[in-house]
Amino acid sequence: MEMKWLLYVTLLALGTLAAQEHDVGDDDGDVIDIEDDLDDGVEEIEDSNPESSTPPPAPKVTYRAPVPTGEVYFVESFDKGTLDGWILSKAKKDDTDDEIAKYDGKWEVQDMKDTKLPGDKGLVLVTRAKHHAISSKLSKPFVFDTKPLIIQYEVNFQNGIECGGAYVKLLSKTPELNLDQFHDKTPYTIMFGPDKCGEDYKLHFIFRHKNPKTGKYEEKHAKRPDADLKTYFTDKKTHLYTLILNPDNSFEILVDQMVVNSGNLLNDMSPPVNPPREIEDPNDQKPEDWDERPKIPDPDAVKPDDWDEDAPAKIADENAVKPEGWLDDEPEYVADPDAEKPEDWDEDMDGEWEAPQIANPKCESAPGCGTWQRPMIDNPNYKGKWKPPMIDNVNYQGIWKPRKIPNPDFFEDLEPFKMTPFSAVGLELWSMTSDIFFDNFIICTERAVADDWANDGWGLKKAADGAAEPGVVGQMMAAAEERPWLWVVYILIVAFPVFLVVLFCCSGKKQPSAAEYKKTDAPQPDVVSDEREEEKDKGDKEEEEEANEEKLEEKQKNDADIGSASQEEEEEEEEEEDRKL
């Protein structure tokens, strides 16, 4: 037990020393700089063996512009370094101050900050606190028929995100569509992508559904994903956003090729695509005699004669006694004798000066001062206002609801997938954070084509980031530099297995060796169970021998008693014979 405690204390001491060593400042001249000594040692080793100390270079990832492997409606990698094919909006927002109504936010094609892939460019929202709008035509309009719709692109919040979006709009094909005047009210078919303000992290999927009866459009929002989206907005890494819509009305939303939300257009949108068959009659009114009370006061109940409604809730304690030494004539507060009237006090303006009140010093040693009053206690006779007990209402009719009538606006659209065709993709955004990076847009119908495009674009970024990141040991060391207390954790993790090994090795009983058995010619047991059985048999034999010895001693004692008795009889007989002679 002493060894266990000694090891435990030693581990704690090592952890404490390691944490203190990382907290010591460089300016402390009385402390030995262990890191300098280690650095000197490392330099000597490097000088003596320079070839072995050189770390292997990190694997280099070479960038190549992705190329679509199948039919696509739109692709854009921005690797040409220009905005060719994109149109900047010149519109103004309605109902907005002229100073901020213009879509004058700046867009540029740039390399990503701290890029690990030189040559990989993207579209960057450069300015903050401005309206931005940019769009581009598809190679041909997308018509919703028998093939899925897949839209995919990359986003990197290089400076994090305070409040703003990075979603795309698929602009509906209409005769009025003018990309030069693209603004917030331009009709769109689908809006998809990340959006954040405050601590509300969203991943939008909205589509505009046309009412077949009225011809009006209504936005349908997908349910919020259960996954935690915060990391995608805060880690400053490039993330891949994918929306897949299928002709059977099912949909999937993926981030970094992992599903974070899924559902069906008929069941998982709000408000629902199809309205209810019946609605409440807006002209129906509740009858005046409709009784919604499940309980009512008992009409037959009578207040008891001894019920005193006027009895107070609190009464003075008649058993209380004024403490001895109570100072009735002394006030609790007195004027401060040390206070002096300020020199600038003007009685005409400020009134008559009075010294401030302080606690009476005479009351400090007494149980109390001033007029003593009995303390208040609960009144045992207090009952309060009498009310009749509640009973079930025999006339209860339940909660009234208006009657149902057929919904005059009812319709049933079983194929909401067949949305309005779209012919352009656009970004219409407001952001309080700059340098949002967009890259590698693709709109297609085949999952394999989208996956190939992702692997050649986002996959290269991910591989390059992974190659540049330090190993596990490097990450642990970097984390410990920021949080010195982690050294204690590391030491305990390393030392704990050693502690267990020492504990088990030192606490076991020493077993006799084969040589010791040979020295004593004692039989050596093959297994522990045989040894226990032999010990038990040996104990039984010893008990049996002891019992036999006891029986033998009793028998000898009895024989001795019998022999002595017979000898006495012989002597008596001899004496009698001598008397006769």
Image (cartoon, helix red, strand yellow):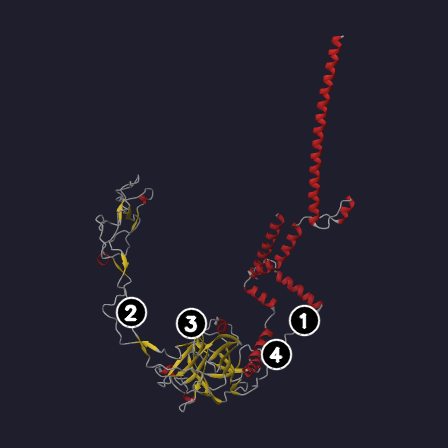
Q: Do the residues labelled 2 and 1 touch (CB within 8 Å)?
A: no
Q: Mark 2 points at which residue?
A: 400
Dot in front, 2 or 1: 2
Left or right of 541 on screen, residue 259:
left
Left or right of 212 on screen, residue 300:
left
Give the mark nearest the N terminus, 1 or 4: 1
Residue 446 drawn at (x, y percent) = 53, 84
Q: Name the residue under label 1.
A: 54
Residue 570 drawn at (x, y percent) = 74, 16
Give the mark nearest the N terminus, 4 or 2: 4
C-alpha span from label 1 to label 3:
47 Å
Residue 375 drawn at (x, y percent) = 28, 45
Q: Mark 3 points at which residue?
A: 198
C-alpha span from label 3 to label 4:
37 Å
Residue shown at the point (60%, 68%) measured from the top left: 472
Label 2 SS: loop
